[in-house]
Image: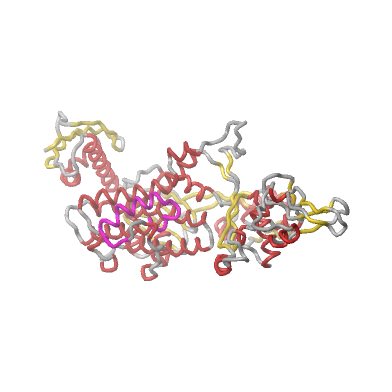
Amino acid sequence: MGNFLENIIDWGLSRERYWGTPLPVWTCAECGKVHVIGSKQELKELCGIEGDIELHRPYIDEPTFKCSCGGTMSRVKDVIDCWFDSGSMPFAQLHYPFENKELFEKQFPADFISEAVDQTRGWFYTLLVISTLLFDKAPFKNCIVLGHVNDKNGLKMSKHIGNVVDPWTVLNKQGADAVRWYFYTGSAPWLPSRFYPEAVSEAQRKFMGTLWNAYAFFVLYADIDKYDPSKYDINKIKLSVMDKWILSKLNTLIDAVDKGLDKYQIFETSRMLQDYADELSNWYIRRGRERYWGKDMTEDKIAAYTTLYTVLVTLAKLSAPFVPFMAESIYQNLVPAFYKDAPMSIHLCSFPVSNEAMIDTKLEEGMAVVLDVVVLGRATRNTSNIKNRQPLSKLFVATERAGALSEELITIAKEELNVKELEVLTDAKGFISYKLKPQLKTLGPKYGAKLGLIRQFLETCDANSVVETVKSGVPYKVELGGQEIEFTVDDLLISSESKEGYVSASENGVTVVLDTTITKELLFEGIEREIVSKIQTMRKEAGFEVTDRINLYYQAEGDALTVLTEKGKDIGDDVLAVSVTQTAEVKGYSKEWDIVGAKVTLGVEKA
């Protein structure tokens, strides 16, 4: 827009068209005099017209009047560029200044306008020019520019090419909310977007599918327990650390979304909603599933239901401007039946207001560290090919954000990664060693003749010290062959190795080191968990109810046989088995498994 204004050329207002606002210009065929008529009254007086007058063609072409030279003044046939009409819209729609003065002044300038990027030299420009001429200010406070919608390959859609997407095929399959959500989250509004059904489905899955699954999970268990949210007050319930965290994040989200929408940051706010829904479903709900399973409405179960209910209703309200139909569906099922005085629609509710008393920034920071630790811990398990069901003795965590880790949060990380102990360190130097090579494309131009010395130095130096220095943003300096050499992080090819028996991973200022040593006790505990997991799978496959008691039969070899023999009672308690029997002939629904290299045959039948 700025470039366009710098190089602006004169605007030719007239157009040779039939339809449009007639140009109010009369000219004399004899002397060429030009007269611009400024009102209906002036036109009537000059042309001797009584009564009303029609200002559109062909009627406006008929009135004439005498020129001072004696010739006839006739209207030129041109009309005004239709963009002049569009640019006059803010005041013309209200017939200002002839009427509606107060209404116009209340509405002007507009909070925002929105059109595609090609309106830079169309509507955006004409609005600005006319408003500047008349009012000496812009007619809008914000302008949301939309990029063009292209096909999946970034090409302009064209019937000739055959790459046009019929919007109704997407609207009928994925729905209007999904299409809206795709455009909100796909990219910033002013950038071109690539539109195709698969992209809409992916965007739909990431947020709408995730939120709907969380909602469906709540409804499933709330219906079973006949949970009534009107009986409980979130402020009077004993909350777990996970409850406090998700509610803190919710109120932080409310504040961020509210401020973001005030600034018309649609892309940023929709991504915040998407990230929160992901953490709600894949962290908060996944870690707390067992809280909803018991028969009795315990204090903890009430806290779980009330927290999740509060989150779902609030999240529906936050997302209502983005996905109005899904938000309405969630609201109608969760609110009016329990609160008779509630607004009849979510779109009649007030936008949520953040409760600062529920925001715990240290808890949020600590949980963010835990989430980083869990991601990295899983990566180290994958690297070492050790399943998460196999308990391990210890995980070391090095981070500058360690102060945010409470004992409760450390316990969560230990449970999630199935380690017995988690130790927080100031650094992980004792577990990681680095190897350095020169980055030739940067060091070559600077120190070409010294590359041999540089390579030799990097092979024998204290690599940990060099890496620590350059990663802090400070160049590492050394004198080689009578010349001072400086290394930055871009000058080095850095590879890392973990100490034997350990695997490490680093990201976001967090380093985790996993002790991969598996003792006999840990091995047996892992085998026990594997057996329990396999039996639970067989229970489902056999069609048993969650509460059904069973008889368990087994044949096994090696360590698996030892575990089944020594831990049979514990395994039976976990899978609701009234008997655990080693037998020559496995009864009931049976299946053969490979458990840590040992052949195991299991059989389950209803007791």
Residue at 56% x, 42% y: name it: 194
Q: Is 195 displayed left or right of 176 in the figure?
A: right
Residue at 23% x, 40% y: name it: 536
Q: Is residue 308 visible?
A: yes
Residue 130 x, y percent position in the rendering: 68, 60
Residue 328 is covered by the magenta coloring: yes
Nearer to the camera, 605 or 101: 101
Nearer to the camera, 563 or 283: 283
Region of the chain picked out in magenta, as a range: 316-342
Quarter of the rendering containing residue 484:
bottom right
Q: Which quadrant is home to the N terminus? A: bottom right
Residue 354 x, y percent position in the rendering: 40, 66
Q: Is 176 displayed left or right of 29 in the figure?
A: left
Nearer to the camera, 303 or 567: 303
Q: Is residue 597 above or below residue 80?
A: above
Residue 23 x, y percent position in the rendering: 73, 53
Q: Is residue 452 visible?
A: no
Quarter of the rendering containing residue 543:
top left
Residue at 52% x, 50% y: name it: 496
Furthest residue in direction top, as rendered = 585
How does the figure colour the protein chain or chains? secondary structure
Q: Which quadrant is home to the C terminus? A: top left
Residue 228 x, y percent position in the rendering: 23, 58
Count how many numbered circles sit on residues in the image. Answer: 0
Q: Is residue 79 above or below residue 138?
A: above
Quarter of the rendering containing residue 476:
bottom right
Nearer to the camera, 513 or 483: 513
Furthest residue in direction bottom, as rendered = 357
Q: Is 357 displayed left or right of 467 in the figure?
A: left
Residue 341 is covered by the magenta coloring: yes
